[in-house]
């Protein structure tokens, strides 16, 4: 699985296995997989294993047809064949899947009614919705899910050095909150939500979908930290080696890192920190920046309050609607928060491939 993940991550289309499937077809242009007369190129050739060897073949999953070299659902089947002493053999099939990648609606996405945003008074800060490291279309700096919250968010931006908020408009022109406040802060379009749901299977406005996302990420996490933990005590990853860290409660981001950080409590974010990747604050839905510094966030932030409209955990409305999210960027310094599609994609591609089916054939 890791060999396939690495191969896929370096391909021309890492959100699909088509490149890998096509490269392993034999002269007949189809995938035969393991079997007599196969002309497929093995994903892994004969490799030593104890007193025997193993070989791995790659085919498409059964839903799309095993011989089909075109992958449309991010799932493929690995067939591992091990040969041992005295003619012994074992065959194991595992269908694996990419973790569903989804782009963010904005550099900062606030999900749920009653969103609160405080931009901070620093005139040296830079918040950018235009993709700073990839080719994604320009995003707003801030997107809210409830149109009733947009006026208050735009009002706060206007009062907190509006020239420090940047993106590009539909014509490709550089704009700020001074010249085009509607491009800087917007309501998430229904089409955007539908596209994300179709791509990832996640409805960003459904609390249960977001809880399921947290659970799936926790199952694959490099580190699961207790509430109250500081990043300085953990391996938070590097751009070359992103890591998935899940904090089960409040968390202080006071050390550099890269990958995906999931916080189910309040995220305290040091202004001096550099982080490359995706910050998912899914729980109490609170972010608080503190201190002075010239830290840099390259990626994006998604904030949602899963405690429901009453803002209390464990009550009946928790699965009905999202509660009010809050983001406070108060403090000084010349910190930067930049939307960056490449670091987000790299963070997802670093996740292990999920096994969705397993079968021992012999």
Image (cartoon, rainbow, N blue to C red):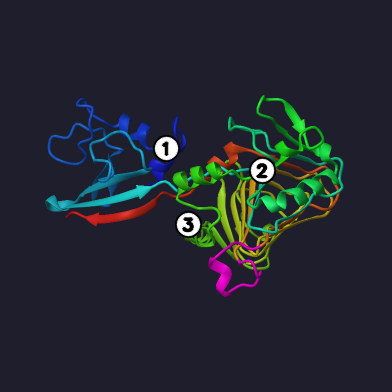
Residue depth check, mark 3 versus mark 2: number of the one nearer the observer = 2
Q: Position of residue 362 (x, y in %)?
A: 17, 55
Is the magenta region chiefly helix, strand or loop? loop
Please name whichever residue, 280 or 235, is drawn nearer the observer in this view of the structure: 280
The mark that comes first in sequence, 1 or 3, is 1
Please name whichever residue, 46 or 6, is drawn nearer the observer in this view of the structure: 6
Q: CA distance from mark 1 to mark 3?
A: 18 Å
In the rendered view, tell whether residue 60 sits above or below residue 24.
below
> Which residue bears the numbered disc 3?
220
Please name whichever residue, 28 or 61, is drawn nearer the observer in this view of the structure: 61
Q: Residues within 10 Å of mark 1 (few under 14, many from 20)?
A: many
Chain part drawn in magenta = 307-323
Element class at badge 2: loop
The mark that comes first in sequence, 3 or 2, is 2
> Residue 321's quadrant in the figure?
bottom right
Residue depth check, mark 2 versus mark 1: number of the one nearer the observer = 2
> Which residue bears the numbered disc 2?
107
Q: Position of residue 342 (x, y in %)?
A: 58, 37
Q: Position of residue 264 (x, y in %)?
A: 61, 63
Q: CA distance from mark 2 to mark 1?
A: 26 Å
Kindly identify the residue that appears in the image at 60 percent across and 32 percent down: 137
Q: Do the CB atoms of the residues marked 2 and 1 lie less than 8 Å apart? A: no
Q: How many numbered marks appear? A: 3
Q: CA distance from mark 3 to mark 2?
A: 25 Å
Please name whichever residue, 81 or 284, is drawn nearer the observer in this view of the structure: 284
| Horizontal relation, residue 298 to residue 245: left or right | right
Q: Which mark is residue 8?
A: 1
């Amino acid at each position: 699985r890791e060999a396939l993940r690495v191969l896929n991550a370096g391909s021309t289309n890492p959100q699909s296995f088509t490149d890998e499937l096509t490269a392993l077809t034999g002269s007949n242009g189809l995938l035969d997989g393991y079997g007599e007369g196969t002309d497929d190129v093995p994903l892994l050739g004969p490799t030593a294993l104890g007193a025997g060897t193993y070989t791995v073949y790659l085919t498409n999953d059964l839903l799309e047809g095993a011989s089909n070299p075109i992958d449309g659902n991010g799932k493929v089947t690995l067939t591992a064949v091990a040969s041992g002493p005295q003619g012994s053999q074992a065959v194991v099939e595992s269908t694996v899947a990419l973790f569903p990648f989804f782009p963010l609606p904005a550099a900062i996405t606030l999900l749920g009614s009653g969103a609160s945003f405080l931009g901070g008074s620093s005139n040296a800060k830079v918040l950018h919705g235009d993709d700073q490291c990839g080719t994604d279309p320009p995003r707003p700096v801030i997107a809210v899910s409830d149109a009733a919250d947009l006026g208050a968010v735009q009002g706060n931006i206007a009062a907190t050095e509006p020239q420090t908020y940047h993106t590009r408009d539909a014509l490709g022109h550089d704009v700020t909150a001074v010249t085009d406040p509607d491009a800087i802060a917007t309501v998430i379009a229904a089409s955007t939500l539908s596209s994300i749901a179709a791509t990832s299977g996640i409805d960003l406005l459904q609390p249960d979908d977001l809880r399921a996302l947290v659970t799936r990420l926790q199952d694959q996490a490099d580190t699961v930290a207790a509430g109250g933990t500081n990043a300085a005590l953990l391996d938070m990853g590097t751009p070359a080696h992103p890591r998935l860290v899940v904090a089960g409660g409040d968390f202080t981001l006071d050390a550099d890192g890269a990958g995906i950080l999931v916080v189910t409590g309040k995220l305290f974010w040091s202004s001096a920190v550099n982080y490359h990747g995706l910050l998912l604050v899914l729980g109490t839905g609170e972010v608080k920046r503190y201190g002075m510094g010239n830290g840099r966030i390259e990626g994006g932030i998604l904030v949602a309050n899963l405690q429901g409209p009453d803002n209390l955990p464990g009550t009946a409305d928790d699965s009905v609607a999202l509660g009010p999210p809050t983001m406070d960027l108060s403090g000084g310094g010349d910190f930067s928060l930049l939307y960056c599609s490449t670091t987000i994609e790299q963070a997802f591609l670093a996740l292990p491939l999920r096994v969705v089916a397993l079968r021992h054939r012999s």
